[in-house]
Image (tube, rainbow, N blue to C red):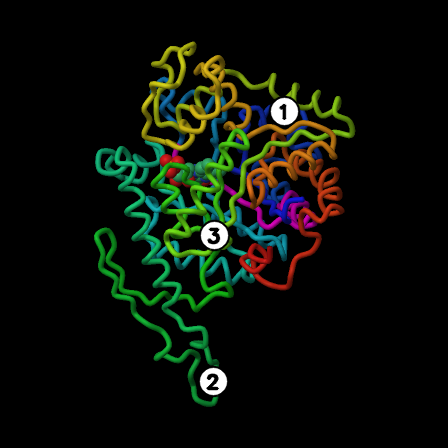
């Protein structure tokens, strides 16, 4: 039997998370919800909290994919992760409606100076009472870079230099989060001292990219620093994760890919002198569960038939930073060089056999779930698959990707969670502590 594993909920608010069919699925927003109002997201986070998920996550980006046909118009038409809410804003609504579950937002190291991120996350950690996490991304697509005024030649096309900058970005944040000692706030009315000035320190950071004086103007938060999350899959991305991350997301299509990623990351952590258990690996997963296998299969078929090749091409072009309209849809992906999600194309190359490695099919897979594996079955079958996967891969958990909102999450929590809890494979209660305490509890 595998060890206990972790669960988290993926979203990219508010319309298209991984599936390009979500917005038009007949079960989407069932219950009278509206995608651009907070109630549905608060409800979903509450469902996850009742099921004792580690955290609720929202991805983010600062632009509309404009690679496919060299235009943003296909993305707008097919809702290819647009509209995209500002994650920092929506996550406050979610944190306010929950009390135990972790709340992980996304920030780009290209978008905002590290001081602003350090301050925002310290504030969020206070207000959520130690439940804050931040997914660190480097702004991987062209329009985000253009919207942020980042020179494409200097930044976007130099994959590894984005991570060099992100390394320094993190160092600045760490120093700012540490700029208030734990006992700096004394609230000594008799001595007329709110905080002890000797316990609050300037950082005077001067690096290659950043020049930051500090100290932070927010006192030390419950977790000291938010939980650091990352999702790079390239060699340089994994190196960054091994250095900084406490949770990572990865999209791997099969057990072999998962195991390869898991071992690569954990070995890199050991090389850097970190305990490999101090960073948990979450594998993306799209579940269709029903009272019977037949019902589940019908749900998956309905969903998959709603995905069009064009929508898949649009999203994949965005994720790869490459106009796939210029490629032959019936050719294989073997020769395509990309500057976007390198790890993603590597995963496709590694896992798809020669016979079905055609661009058209890959684009369809991408439109269905961004290549997150689809698991279809009754609740026992889904639970079995999850247990077998953890056994084969060695940990640490799953990031659930919804096909329709809030039904996918409700069905999983109603049908699968009781089985996983009865088998003692997932937690059935939170410990009294922070997001980090809960994540490190097993
Ligand atoms: C599950 C998952 C979620 C991601 N979420 C985001 C996101 O919210 N915003 C973003 O800009 N990049 C996101 N990415 C991309 C990566 O974080 C990364 O910054 C970048 O694309 C470089 O990846 P690479 O190391 O694989 O080349 C995500 C990737 C994965 C696999």
On screen, residue 90 versus residue 139, left or right, reads right
- Whether residue 53 appears in magenta in the rendering, the answer is yes
- At x 58% / y 27%, what residue is drawn? 23
Ligand 1 quadrant in view: top left
**Residue 9 coordinates in the image, percent (x, y):** 59, 42
Mark 1 element type: loop
Q: Distance between the residues labelled 1 and 2?
A: 58 Å
* Closer mark to the observer between disc 1 and disc 3: 3
- Whether residue 262 appears in magenta in the rendering, the answer is no
Q: Mark 3 points at which residue?
A: 276
Mark 3 element type: helix
Q: Do the residues labelled 3 and 2 touch (CB within 8 Å)?
A: no
| Picture quarter with the C terminus | bottom right
- At x 22% / y 38%, what residue is drawn? 154
Q: Which of 333 and 110 is in front in this view?
A: 333
Q: Quadrant of residue 210?
A: bottom left
Q: In which quarter of the image is residue 400?
A: top right
Q: How far apart are marks 1 and 3 (CA)?
A: 40 Å
Q: Name the residue under label 2.
A: 188
**Residue 307 coordinates in the image, percent (x, y):** 56, 19
| Picture quarter with the N terminus | top right
Q: Do the residues labelled 1 and 2 touch (CB within 8 Å)?
A: no
Q: Nearer the viewer, residue 424 or 221?
A: 424
Is residue 182 among what the camera can see? yes
The range drawn in magenta is 42-63
Task: Look at the picture and state if 74 lies above or below 416.
Answer: above
Q: Name the residue under label 1.
A: 25
- Which mark sits nearer the N-terminus, 1 or 2? 1
């Amino acid at each position: 039997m595998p060890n206990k594993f972790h669960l988290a909920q993926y979203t990219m608010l508010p319309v298209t998370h991984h599936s390009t069919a979500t917005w038009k699925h007949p079960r989407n927003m069932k219950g009278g919800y509206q995608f651009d109002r907070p109630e549905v997201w608060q409800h979903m986070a509450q469902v996850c909290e009742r099921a004792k998920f580690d955290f609720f996550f929202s991805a983010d980006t600062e632009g509309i994919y404009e690679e496919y046909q060299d235009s943003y118009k296909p993305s707008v038409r097919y809702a290819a992760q647009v509209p995209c809410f500002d994650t920092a804003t929506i996550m406050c609504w979610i944190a306010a409606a929950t009390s135990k579950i972790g709340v992980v937002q996304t920030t780009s190291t290209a978008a905002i100076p590290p001081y602003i991120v350090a301050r925002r996350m310290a504030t969020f950690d206070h207000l959520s009472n130690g439940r804050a996490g931040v997914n660190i991304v480097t702004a991987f697509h062209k329009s985000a870079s253009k919207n942020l005024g980042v020179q494409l030649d200097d930044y976007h096309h130099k994959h590894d230099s984005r991570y060099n900058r992100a390394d320094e970005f993190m160092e600045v944040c760490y120093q700012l989060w540490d700029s208030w000692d734990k006992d700096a706030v004394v609230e000594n009315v008799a001595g007329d001292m709110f905080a002890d000035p000797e316990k609050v320190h300037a950082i005077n950071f001067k690096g290659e990219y950043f020049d930051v004086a500090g100290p932070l103007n927010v006192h030390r938060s419950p977790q000291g620093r938010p939980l650091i999350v990352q999702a790079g899959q390239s060699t340089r991305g994994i190196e960054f994760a091994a250095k900084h991350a406490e949770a990572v997301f990865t999209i791997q299509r099969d057990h072999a890919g998962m195991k390869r990623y898991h071992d690569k990351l954990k070995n890199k952590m050991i090389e850097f002198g970190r305990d490999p258990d101090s960073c948990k690996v979450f594998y993306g997963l799209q579940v269709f569960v029903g009272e019977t296998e037949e019902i589940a299969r019908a749900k998956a078929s309905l969903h998959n038939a709603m995905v069009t090749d064009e929508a898949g091409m649009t999203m994949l072009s965005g994720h790869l930073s490459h106009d796939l309209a210029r490629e032959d849809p019936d050719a294989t992906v073997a020769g395509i060089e990309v500057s976007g999600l390198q790890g993603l194309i590597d995963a496709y190359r590694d896992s798809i056999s020669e016979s079905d490695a055609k661009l058209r099919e890959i684009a369809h897979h991408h439109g269905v779930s961004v290549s997150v594996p689809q698991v279809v079955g009754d609740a026992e079958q889904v639970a079995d698959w999850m247990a077998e996967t953890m056994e084969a891969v060695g940990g640490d958990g799953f990031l659930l990707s919804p096909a329709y909102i809030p039904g996918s999450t409700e069905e999983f929590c109603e049908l699968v969670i009781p089985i996983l809890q009865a088998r003692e494979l997932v937690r059935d209660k939170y410990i009294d502590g922070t997001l980090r305490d809960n994540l490190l509890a097993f």
